């Protein structure tokens, strides 16, 4: 995935630049909501009976920390 020309090291500024380019309003709020949901991945996965090892493996790929 490429965001604002980057494949790694995305920052909130990168997401907001793309959102602005596409006329997306309330981008910061949307990113915060998505971040909160993704952080709750283990709960959702557990309810869906995903195996713990798979929950951990998938969780490692989540890019969190853009919201401060």
Image (cartoon, rainbow, N blue to C red):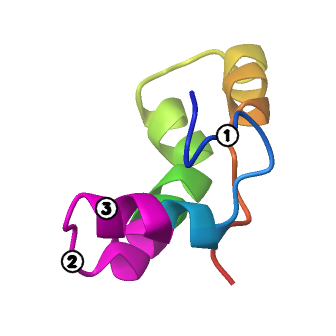
Quarter of the image holding residue 7? top right
Q: Residue at x 69, y 46 (%)?
A: 63
Residue 64 placement, left or right of 30 = right
Residue for badge 2: 25
Nearer to me, 14 or 41:
14
Residue for badge 3: 21
Please identify, in this view, whether the residue under mark 3 or under mark 1 is nearer the observer. Answer: 3
Q: For the residues marked 2 and 1, what is the alpha-carbon distance in whole angstroms?
A: 24 Å
Q: Residue at x 60, y 56 (%)?
A: 39
Quarter of the image holding residue 14? bottom right
> Which residues are drawn in magenta?
16-33
- Expressed as whole percent of the image width and height from the top left, the position of residue 4 reads 56, 49
Dot 2 or dot 1: first in sequence order is 2
* SS at circle 1: loop
Would residue 17 be counted in the magenta stretch? yes
Residue 20 placement, left or right of 53 = left
Residue 24 placement, left or right of 8 = left
Q: For the residues marked 3 and 2, what is the alpha-carbon distance in whole angstroms?
A: 11 Å
């Amino acid at each position: 995935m490429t965001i604002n020309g980057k494949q790694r090291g995305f920052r909130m500024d990168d997401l907001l630049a793309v959102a602005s380019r596409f006329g997306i309003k309330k981008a910061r709020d949307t990113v915060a909501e998505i971040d909160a949901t993704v952080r709750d991945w283990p709960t959702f996965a557990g309810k869906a009976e995903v195996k713990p090892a798979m929950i951990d493996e998938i969780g490692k790929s989540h890019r969190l920390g853009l919201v401060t």
